[in-house]
Image (tube, helix red, strand yellow):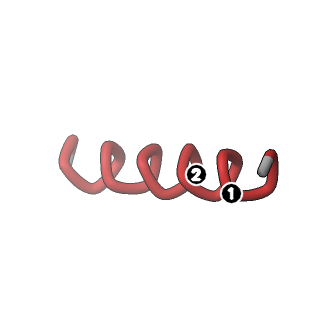
Amino acid sequence: MEADKSTMVALLQLLRKYNLK
């Protein structure tokens, strides 16, 4: 599902942002 892919990508990006602190 494309929606699932988009959600996963968004979550990964958020995690990266937090990890960059």
Q: Which mark is residue 18?
A: none
5 or 9, which lies in front?
5
User: Based on the displayed image, in which of its 4 quarters is residue 7 positioned?
Assistant: bottom right
Q: Nearer the viewer, mark 2 or mark 1?
A: 1
Give left or right: position of 3 versus 7.
Answer: right
- Label for residue 4? 1
Indicate which disc, 2 or 1, sits on the residue closer to the N terminus: 1
Q: Secondary structure at mark 1?
A: helix
Q: Nearer the viewer, residue 12 or 19?
A: 12
Distance from the alpha carbon under mark 2 to that under mark 1:
10 Å
In the picture, measured across the screen, residue 13 lies left or right of residue 18, that is right
Question: Measuring 58% from the left and 51% from the top, which residue is drawn there?
Answer: 10
Q: Residue furthest front?
A: 1
Kind of residue indicated by mark 1: Asp
Q: Residues within 10 Å of mark 1 (few under 14, many from 20)?
A: few
Query: Who is closer to the viewer here, 14 or 5?
Result: 5
Q: Residue at x 80, y 46 (%)?
A: 2
Q: Is residue 3 left or right of residue 9?
A: right
Q: Are the residues flagged by discs 2 and 1 in contact, CB closer than 8 Å?
A: no
Q: Residue at x 68, y 57 (%)?
A: 4
Q: Which residue is mark 2?
A: 10
> Which element type, helix, strand or loop, lies under badge 2?
helix
